[in-house]
Amino acid sequence: MTITTTKNNGCLTLELEGRLDTTTAPELETVIKNGLEGVDRLVLDMEGLAYLSSAGLRVILAAQKQMNRQGTMTVRNVCGTIMEVFEVTGFTDILTIE
């Protein structure tokens, strides 16, 4: 998975490309943990994301919980397959999806 990071005026945008699974989830978790200081808005851009596993869901949920304490989180450009995963798991009720 490729993670492109952009930080601007308290907004951290992470563009995800490839597969977010057991192998790559720890990388995303590290990027989020190390990047959230001073951030009040987190954007996960999933335009290039092809696959999302339960390990990826766990990282997204942890990020949402952290951002509930310090600002907002938005998930955008979600493909149909990943949107279906969000719907089945109830994440559509937790996340702000654009």
Image: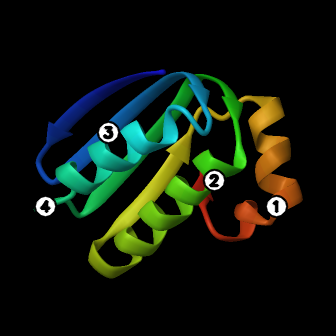
SS at circle 1: helix
SS at circle 2: helix
Left or right, 2 with respect to 18, comes to left
Give the amino acid type for the residue marked by disc 4 in the picture: Glu
Labels 2 and 1 touching (C-beta < 8 A): yes
Sequence order check: which comes first, mark 2 or mark 4? 4
The residue mark sitting in front, 1 or 3, is 1
Q: How far is the residue under mark 2 from the one under mark 4? A: 22 Å
Give the amino acid type for the residue marked by disc 2 in the picture: Leu
Mark 3 residue crowding within 10 angstroms, few (<14) / some (14–19) / many (20+)? many
Q: Is residue 7 above or below residue 50?
A: below
Q: Residue at x 22, y 32 (%)?
A: 6
Sequence order check: which comes first, mark 1 or mark 3? 3
Q: How far is the residue under mark 4 from the one under mark 1? A: 29 Å
Q: How far is the residue under mark 1 from the one under mark 3? A: 24 Å
- Residue under numbered circle 2: 57
- Residue under numbered circle 1: 89
Sequence order check: which comes first, mark 4 or mark 1? 4
